[in-house]
Image: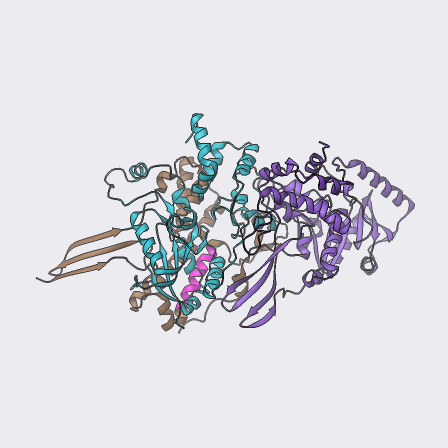
Chain colours: A brown, B cyan, C purple
Amino acid sequence: MSKRTLSIPHLGRVEGHGGIYVRIEDDEVREVNLEVYEGSRYYEALLRGKHVDDVQGIITRVCAICSASHTVAALMALEDALGITVSTRTHTLRGLLLLGSTIESHALHIFALALPDFFHVPSVLELAASHPREVTFGLKLKQLGNRIQEGSVDVPSTRSTRASEGSAASRTSASCAPSGRNWRRRSNPWPARSS
Amino acid sequence: MSAPKVGIFGLTGCAGDQLQILNCEDELLRIAERVEIVDWVMARSQNDSNTPLDVAFVEGVVATERDLAYLKSIRARSRTLVALGTCAVWGGLPAMRNELPREVLRREVYAGGAEFLDTREARPATDFVPFEFRLPGCPIERHEFLRLLNAILCGGKPEFLNVPVCWECKTRENLCRVVHYKEVCCGAMTRAGCGARCPSHGVPCAGCRGPVEEPNYDANITMFQDRGISWVEIARKMEAFSAPVWMKLGLEREHARERARGGRS
Amino acid sequence: MQTLRLEVQRLPVFLSALRDEGDLFAPVERLAPKDGRSGVYSLERIFDVAQAHPEALRTILPFKKLLLPPRTVLTRARDGAWEDGDELPIRPMIFYGAHACDVHSLKILDLLFLSDFADPYYQRRREQLTVIGYGCIPDDKCFCQSLGTANVDDGFDLFFTPLEGRFMVTVASARGDDLVRRYPVGFEPSTRDDTREYLDRLKRRTEAFTLALDAHDLPYVLELKKDDPVWEELGRKCLCCGSCSMVCPTCTCFNMWDEMPEENCSERLRCWDACLYRDYALVAGGHNFRARRADRVRNRYYHKQEAFVREFGMPSCVGCGRCIENCPTGIHVVEVFQHVRGDA
């Protein structure tokens, strides 16, 4: 009888914390223990007593990678409960936010979390040494997803000079905080297509 | 001279501060050339969890016994320890209602049968071990992280100003959320560095970066109350990112007064 | 000084023409979410002169933001070589909509940044600035009259005072004179009627002030009132948010520090600072000269009305009312001084 065990005490390159133990006997999996070490934050219960306005800001912090999905899900749930219908514009903007999130999290997953396995390296940083162009492209793709979510993609538009709320970036006043340092420098961030 | 050994760790949290490091897309590969990242569970496999570290970054709250043991082990092997993010520095959202017993929360969320959960009152990592640097933010600002890292690698000490969000908010010429909208805005108590992002988008500051040194807590509360905002509303806004600090400064006292009056909480 | 007249409808033609001279800045109304009107203005670069609200009494930030940006990179070292930090070319700037208090504050900034040791960063912007004034009627927060800054006859280039259907145009500099000659959109010599109406308007304006502060002996009173309980009271009320300093046209305190934004790159920064911030008077060794809020609040008031007067013979407050408008806890500078001297 052949016995094998697989034990990974702390799974790497996944978001969240967990370990796995697998016992195999005669090519048959006999036991699988998945342990999740992540502490409980009890957001569901902590939300009680909060005002509806504050829910989204809390729920978006459930998970950093899919913060946009949590945001939209929370808003939809509240709107459902309150019988609110949003405008087409709001709906479309949320769609854009989710697309940005999808681009970012898929690029992160593919290039930084999954691909190193296929190349037998510990992380994307080692992968960058052997495949610099591809990794750079992956990071730029991820950045595009982030920029869509941050609303910092340059969209051609008729720029109003009227000072409007929430358009700090287009105004003349320079803030104390460094803003958009990186954005300005990048004219064409896309590397040439790998052949 | 060999590259400094670096570890990046997450306790209980959303991994947002680690993600912000990965979000330094333009700088990440250069950072990796300057330091040797030997332990980063979120982005690496085959991690070395024993080597002494020159610099360690820790995000998240201590919400389990395992978190605490992990944090202590990280401290023991690190020369320079940096708290990343508001959870690690101040407690953040998981610590917003620490007066509620965890058993109650556990029953409410998981019903019965989850007694095996390793759980304890959520507290900031900085409550348990000494840290050389603290970088608040929910999540951290990329430019601040890069400034901090560059300074550490040069053996310097980065300057992060102890000034409130109003400093940046005024330079952006936003309509004041308190003066013009009569809202509970934590900007005057909260540390700047975010570029007043929320007020610049028409949302009052929720205090996600934690307090400035010596915030004038009482005057802020009076200011909100003078604008006709009820105590309940003030409390519900402030019971968020920096709740443990506000509780210490007076929120707890006001809660007790409200309870005595038969109100909420 | 020379006075001219200009028909009201000719002013936009003149201003539009001025855009060839440089970037035109004017008070613009900030949009509010619901009805769109906020009644709050900020100084912005404008492309359409119809957006300008020169009559707006105060913008959130005064025009010091054009001369002393909130954040300036003074110098930069990259890969071991020095670079000029403040590298953007400064285009000529025309500020349309300055009031008398603004012009007086400009004189104070010049005094601080151009006398003795000229600050090159300020100077290169200042040289590019053209100031076009606009006559105002005070509101309940204006108290320039009490500080002798309600009128001005120099320190600007042109000044437009609205009269019935026309403007009285005051030319106070060679640059102003050049502009009216270069763009002859209908400037004519002013008449006796214009002068009479102008003086009538000044009289009406003088009577329109509702806020007053007896400042003539304030430095002496303040000298005696250093331990007045009002400072402790203000220390409890003040958030030390620094809003009043940010919006003050003559608050110019700054902080300087070095930062490494990138590898092999170090920047020396100059950013606005405020004496109300806790670390402002913190020095090496950890001593803080004004560790208490009350000390910091008192310092701000004393600097405006006592120390500055002793040094330069005038207060550094021009009575614009911005700090009154922007203080979230409702601290009112005039009421504070009235209280200190026992008037209230």
Residue nearest the observer in this picture, B232 or A195:
B232
**Which range of residues does the magenta coloring cover?**
A135-148
- Residue C288: percent from the left, percent from the top? 57, 50
Whether B18 is drawn above or below B246: the answer is: below
For the C terminus of chain B, the image quarter is top left
- Residue B205: percent from the left, percent from the top? 51, 44
Name the residue at the right extreme. Answer: C192
Count every numbered label the image shows and give the total. Answer: 0
Q: Is residue B172 magenta?
A: no
Residue nearest the observer in this picture, B119 or A29:
B119
Query: Is residue C212 among the parts visible in the rendering?
Result: yes
Q: Residue at x 64, y 45 (%)?
A: C244
- Residue B209: percent from the left, percent from the top? 48, 48
Give the dominant element type of the magenta stretch: helix, strand or loop. helix
> In screen coordinates, is C87 left or right of C206?
left
- Residue C59: percent from the left, percent from the top? 67, 47
Residue nearest the observer in this picture, A170 or B142:
B142
Query: Is residue A84 among the parts visible in the rendering?
Result: no
For the N terminus of chain B, the image quarter is bottom left
Q: Residue at x 45, y 70 (%)?
A: A191
Whether B143 is drawn above or below A42: the answer is: below
To which quarter of the image does residue C302 belong? top right
Q: Residue at x 46, y 58 (%)?
A: B145
Q: Is residue A139 magenta?
A: yes
Residue nearest the observer in this picture, C280 or C186:
C280
To which quarter of the image does residue C174 belong? bottom right
Name the residue at the top extreme. Answer: B261
> In screen coordinates, is C74 left or right of B213?
right
Whether B40 is drawn above or below B188: the answer is: below
